[in-house]
Amino acid sequence: MNKPAQDADDIDRLSLRDGFRIIIRVSEYLRHVKFRIATKLGLLTIEQVFRLLLLPWALKIIVDNVILGKPIEADGSGFPDYIMPLVLPLRQMNPTEVMGWMLLFGVIIVALFGMTPNRATGRTATGSDTGARSGSIGTAGAILAQGQDTATQSENAANSAFSDMGGLFGLLDFKNHMRLTQSVNHTVRSQLAQHILSLPMTKLADQRIGDSSYRVLYDSTSVTGIYEALAIHLYSGVLMSSIILSILLTNYGNAPEIIIAALLLGPLTFVVTTPFAKIARRRSADSRKAGSKTTSNIEEGMSNVAAVQSLGGNQQESRRFNAASQESFKRFRIEFFVKLSLGMLSQLVFLIGQIVFFILMAGYVIDGTYTPGDYFVVHYYFFALSATFTAFGYLYTELQGFIAGMARVFHLLDTPPEKMQGGIELPKIQSGLVMKDVGFTYPDGRRALNKVNLAASLGEIIALVGPTGAGKTTLAQLTPALFQATEGTVSIDGIDLRDVSVESLRRQISYVFQETQLFSDSVFDNIRYGNKHASLDDVKAVARIAGAHDFVCALPQGYDTLLGTVTSKLSVGQKQRISIARGLLRESRILILDEPTSALDPETESYLIDALHEAAKEKLVIVVAHRLSTIAHADRIYFLKAGEILESGSHSELMAKTQGHYQQYVKLQTGTD
């Protein structure tokens, strides 16, 4: 895939070509809703053609033939040929009758399309346009309450729906547009969220949760702004301009100055607004980065609330969040000021156009070239045309903010995921695990493992032992390919894991992490998360082994208790027992437990060790532990220090080594000489 920028925060480096690439990538999502887009454009075409071809001429009839009482010419001169069948029958009517038919025409227009929409609003996907969608007379729209912030505006953008029509067509158009918007946003959000979960552990460790959440919830809605700008507003503007210019050239060709004045507003608007494009993109990027940092700060503070409170860091954390929040507000004010300045310049160009039109057209009416009714016809077309050109210039600059948002989305999507599907399907594990000359270096250059050689077979309990920072957890995480060895080979049944489908590998491995990770679901569903076919009896059996059954039964709804409501009330040990039960229940060939007994009492630990010996009859059990009572029962112990295996053997074999590393480790732990 083409990356929009070297880094998501390097929005300044986005070139015009990068912007087009992002737009092209957005168009790929629109293929899935092409029928709804075609419906939207079809309804829009019907409405514009109907209004532009008929409505202005109704104004001419009302002014010239009703208010001023002038009769309609016998040949219908002054009207275009396509409208003659509607105009000629009015020749024999008096002004009152003509007005009656015009009222009927107006009722039909309102019933089908609503009242005349304001096409100069310059609508945007954030709902921050100068004429709120839901408030424009004659249009259909819905928008939730929002402020001048990215968060609420983005939520509206995710559900954006409007129609330049009212009436029956407006309702159909609005419903279609809302489904269209939600479908596109759901696709982008879901794809990004799924991709984040597939990123390698080394990347996830560097990716702040708050920043990822911001991109999924807020940056992703930029897709709405891009498709509305290009698929709807651009099409609408081009169609409207084509129809209006055709009518003006055909019926008012002897007033070329007016047509030229309308056409000149286009390049004049772009000359005024184009310099703001790059500025708008930068300011939008700055605002998004600041908002992302604020989200990350509050997420980190809430995640570590126990440490904050216990260490008396409330004020420090408040100051840190306050600084991030102030910066976010500041960046947004700057972005909004750029948009406001742009809007004022656009309106100035628009106002100049209206003044020029009044001077030119008033002269033609005074000298009798055109009637007062013609003034309203031409003004309608001139106003719509100049508003369209003005909106084009504003739209181009507004588009830069959406491009900045999607650049952040695509940058994360372009981060290479784990190789989940590629590679061979790993058969049912029959033998065991072998590591040969394995080394691992983190992306930041820290070496965790060096020249590790290890062999473990099904039916064994293997213990990884050593001081803190020895590389035990890193070594354990190489087996399910949470980390990929940077040197040497890790193989199962003689198959190099680099050639194996990660998905098929992890189906046969259960990993119980040191940091307990539970979901806001029932205890029952948490324990059987890795084995959805397990029965309640199966869940209870492993819960008893893990020492969780008794306290689970004491919960308000037992195994049906939602942990999202009581997780904070469970002790670390209780959470760990649920996590261990989940690992025991999964139908796997390799079971890895990282510090499984650190928060267990001696009795529960004894039950667990017995369970591990029972599980080891059909599985390979790998235990990362410090406690001697857990380590001593292993079939083989690997002692690590500074990323290297210094000794291996059973507890008795290693204790027999005089001045051995493991022996010294045990003596330090037991306080013996």
Image (tube, grey):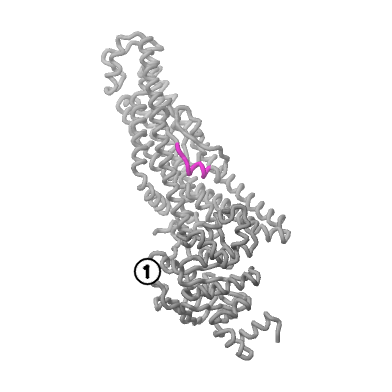
Q: Secondary structure at mark 1?
A: loop
Amino acid at the residue labelled 1: Glu
Side (left or right) of 115 relative to 147? left
Give x and y (percent) for residue 141.
47, 34
* Quarter location, residue 54: top left
Give the answer, above or below, for where 645 lies relative to 547: below
Q: Which residue sits at x=50%, y=30%?
A: 135
Q: Which residue is mark 1?
A: 425
Give x and y (percent) for residue 285.
52, 51
Q: Nearer the viewer, residue 258 or 238?
A: 238
Q: Where, quadrant-wise, is the C terminus in this rendering?
A: bottom right
Which stretch did the figure color magenta?
A: 153-161
Q: Would you say residue 235 is visible in this rendering?
A: yes
Give the answer, above or below, for where 247 lies relative to 663: above
Q: Nearer the viewer, residue 541 or 49?
A: 541
Residue placed farthest to the bottom in the image? 658
Side (left or right) of 150 relative to 271? right
Q: Would you say residue 364 is visible in this rendering?
A: no
Give the answer, above or below, for where 348 lies relative to 222: above
Looking at the magenta stretch, what is its main secondary structure?
helix
Q: Where, quadrant-wise, is the N terminus in this rendering?
A: bottom left
Mark 1 Cα-neighbour bin, 10 Å: few <14, some 14–19, many ≥20: some
Give x and y (percent) for residue 627.
63, 76
* Quarter location, residue 293: bottom right
Give x and y (percent) for residue 50.
34, 27
